[in-house]
């Protein structure tokens, strides 16, 4: 159900709740500063056996999974509070 009443011929805008980088990568545009879902994507954070903090890679993966991180190559979307 729509949150507003519309009449035939009204122009509608649909907000899919995506950050600007998704719109840009897949559609070639952004919503600019008006996008309340915008954020900065951080990627390339892969965890490998050569990382000192991951001597036991399976144990590291288990600990991360317990905290909700299910990928060994995560990406994050961060924004100002």
Image (spheres, rainbow, N blue to C red):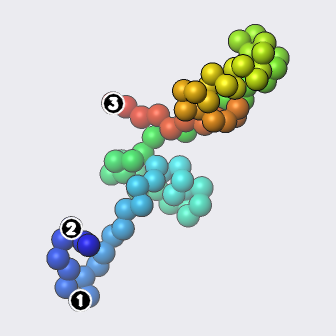
Q: Nearer the viewer, mark 3 or mark 2?
A: 2
Disc 3 is placed on an element classified as loop
Q: Name the residue at 59% across, 61% down.
A: 26
Q: Is residue 53 above or below residue 64?
A: above
Towards the viewer: 59 or 13: 59
Q: Is residue 42 above or below residue 2?
A: above
Q: For residue 72, what is the image quadrant?
A: top right
Disc 1 is placed on an element classified as loop
**Among numbered discs 3 and 1, the one appearing first in the sequence:** 1
Location of the C terminus by quadrant is top left
Q: Which label sits on residue 3? A: 2
Q: Are marks 2 and 1 in contact (CB under 8 Å)?
A: no
Answer few, some or many: residues within 10 Å of disc 3's Cα (few below 14, many 20 plus, some between 14 and 19). Answer: few
Location of the N terminus by quadrant is bottom left
Q: Nearer the viewer, mark 2 or mark 1?
A: 2
Q: Name the residue at 67% across, 29% down.
A: 45
Give the Cα separation between the discs numbered 3 and 1. 39 Å
Q: For residue 41, what is the image quadrant?
A: top right
**Position of 44 compared to 22: left or right?**
right
Towards the viewer: 58 or 3: 58
């Amino acid at each position: 159900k729509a949150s507003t009443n519309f009449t035939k011929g009204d122009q509608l805008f649909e907000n899919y709740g995506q950050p600007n980088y998704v719109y840009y990568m897949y559609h070639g545009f952004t919503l600019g500063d008006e996008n309340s879902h915008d954020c900065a994507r951080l990627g390339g954070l892969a965890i490998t056996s050569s990382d000192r903090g991951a001597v036991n890679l399976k144990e590291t993966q288990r600990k991360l999974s317990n905290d909700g991180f299910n990928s060994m190559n995560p990406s994050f979307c961060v924004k100002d509070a």
